[in-house]
Amino acid sequence: MNMMNDPVGRRAVVIGAGPGGLASAMLLRAAGADVTVLERSDRVGGRTAGFTQDGFTFDYGPTFYLYPQVLREIFAACGRDLDAEVDLRRLDPMYRLQFDDGRTFDATADIDRLTAEAARLSPEDAPNVRRYLETNATKFDSFIPILQRPFLGLGDLMRRDMLAALPNLRPWSSVDTDLKRWFRDPDLRLAFSFQSKYLGMSPFKCPSLFTIIAHVEYGHGVFHPIGGCNAIPQAMARIATEMGVDIRLSEPAEEIGFDGRRATSVRTKTGTIPADAVVVNGDFAGTIPSLIPDARRKRWTDARIAAKKYSCSTFMLYLGIEGRLDDLAHHTIFMSDDYQENIREIDAGLAPEEPTIYVQNAGVTDPTLAPEGHSTLYILVPTGNLSGKVDWPAIAPAYREKVLDRVSRLSGHDIRPRIRTERMLTPADWQAQMGIHRGATFNLAHNLGQMLHFRPRNRFEDVDGVYLTGGGTHPGSGLPTIFESAKIAARLAGDDMGLDPADYAIPDREREAAE
């Protein structure tokens, strides 16, 4: 593989230096293309970017990593070893759920310990834990080829891998309904279904396919990258630069240029860059309308984009505090006492009255994030997106107090007097500062009408020469699936540019499934 030259004279422009954009850039460069990455921000990572404030380091978005196999393949295609480039620490327990009455559930990949945890919530359901996880592993194995290939038309829904997987997918069921086959206790079902929040959806509405997220955790582990999740895009950007990729920060793409239907260039404030392929990694609903005029888009018009369903948003507090909280788990989810009401409020676009709250206390694992004797707390509250018309600038100060009251009560620590630095992001800030449509931090919702062929395609269907990666395209949100989308987009762009398929890190099973 020739990673430092441009033997075929093909040029690719990648818009957005998020994880999907960086992975696409690495793969296309590994295949021989000349690659330029344009990033509107002053840092790489997109929603996986980080920031440092008063000596404390925080991730803006994702705070743990799942299923590193896909990223290992991308690094290997570039002649690199992920585990040598990023220090990934597997967590055990993976996280703790704490219910409002003080009961806890420590999620662990040790099945005997996990069964004992389940027995503390529901002794009669606990014997089903092992069989549930085994069944979910079978479901995952049947669906992984579908996550690894593009859906470019209705015919892709009828391929052999899809038909073979359907009996395992139970598309007519929600995650919670599917779990009722195994667990009668609602709290135990919640312990195995809250992961639908990773997609910004409710377990009562999320298609049952997504019980596979629990298998990804229990079967493959939950990892913390030392330095925070932003250490992953930082390593990718460094490797891409060493390979010869031109990464331009603080240089947003302003418009894609066309010759007929075909994209031929990208214009920025500094000039126009010729392109044989354009890979778009920005927030789909916020980026595509600004780059491609509505008149050029037949399927994904502005009206069609506006009519789509979007994920929830999040209210964020990033706190640098004095002292350590060694009795607080690395990841803790404080569950609302009335989870269904919490979900109803989120679906209505509201700020929940009694929110479920996720807290990352990474200092118990990673001393690099805070000055000695201090800790970082990352606090995330799922909320409605901006469709709910909540006046976030007006309510944010009071909502901060509500969240800090709840965290202090449930953790047993009075947080306020220990705060030494702080940053807050509301759903309105996600839109204004990060360019995320409606502040929907998990992108387009993952209902059945917005998955597979019905999601914007990796080879964008409205024009030629434009490819999509990221949470707004197939296979969907979450870092592992975003990296899969990058592999698909890079393969499609590379094939269309005539690059040597032998230079791709795409296992034969993926290419065969796509044919």
Image: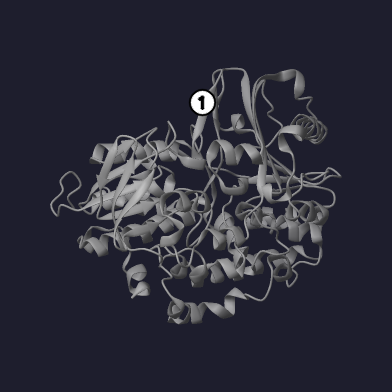
Query: Which element carries disc 1, helix, strand or loop?
Result: helix
Question: Which residue is situated farthest in the front direction here?
Answer: 295
Q: Is residue 194 visible?
A: yes
Residue 62 place in picture, x, y as percent: 55, 43
- Extreme-right residue of the structure: 101
Which residue appears at 25% of the width and 51% of the height? 275
Amino acid type, label 1? Thr
Q: Characterize the local packing of mark 1: few (<14), some (14-19) or many (20 or more) Cα atoms within 10 angstroms.
A: some
Left or right: residue 165 versus residue 439 is: left
Q: Position of residue 158 (x, y in %)?
A: 46, 82
Between 22 and 254, the one nearer to me in the picture: 254
Residue 111 image-quadrant placement: bottom right
Q: Which residue is mark 1?
A: 368
Q: Say if 321 sits above or below 180 in the image.
A: above
* Image quadrant where one finds the C terminus: bottom left
Is residue 366 positioned above or below 81 on the image? above
- Residue 446 is situated, as x and y percent measured from the top left of the image, at 59, 62
Question: Along the horizontal axis of the image, is 9 left or right of 306?
Answer: left
Please say whether residue 109 is visible from this viewpoint. Answer: no
